[in-house]
Image (cartoon, rainbow, N blue to C red):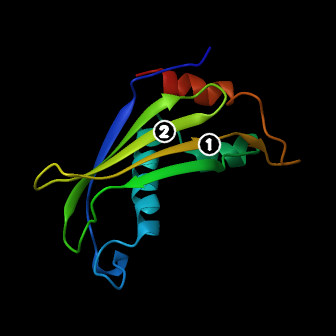
Amino acid sequence: MSEKCKRRCQVELTVPFHDLDAMQVVWHGNYLKYFDIARNALFAEAGINLFEYGVRAQYLFPIIKIKTKHAQPLRFGDRFICTAELVDFRRKIVLDFEIRRQADDLLCAKCRTEQVAVRAADFKMEILIPQEIRTALSSG
């Protein structure tokens, strides 16, 4: 049985010039940066800093799967909302993301990521996300 939660976080961002590619749209790899900003905001709202936890408890939290769908490009100066929504957090931390342009609520990109817990000492993947993280994600 998976643990489910309606934890959700939105961040508002603006496309900077240095995120554009030669076609003057946001380079596809930069969307991952936007998703990561929303992920970190969601964790922060839950009181979690995965880096600090990892150092203290000797865990790493690699992203093992990313599935992204690009629908419409973002351009220089576009203001947009990136939403992160927690889907599951028992065996993997699964997050769904959505980017919508603020001016017209146009869907620009969607993504799902899967993140696991790995022991830093031997790089062995844990079967469950550590209880401390699950507890923090389940409150709220």
* Image coords of residue 62 (percent x, y): 66, 50
Left or right of residue 32, residue 19 in this image: left
Q: In the drawing, does residue 56 fall left or right of residue 82? A: right
- Residue 71, placed above or below residue 136: below
Which quadrant of the figure has residue 7? top left
Give the residue at mark 1: 115
Circle 2: element type: strand
Relative image position of residue 91 (x, y in whole percent): 67, 28
Q: Residue 67: image x %, image y %?
A: 51, 49
Q: CA distance from mark 1 to mark 2?
A: 9 Å
Q: Amino acid at mark 1?
A: Gln
Say what amino acid the circle numbered 2 marks: Leu
Left or right relative to 50: residue 137: left
Residue beneath disc 2: 95
Q: Is residue 90 above or below residue 1?
A: below
Depth order, front residue of 44/38 = 38
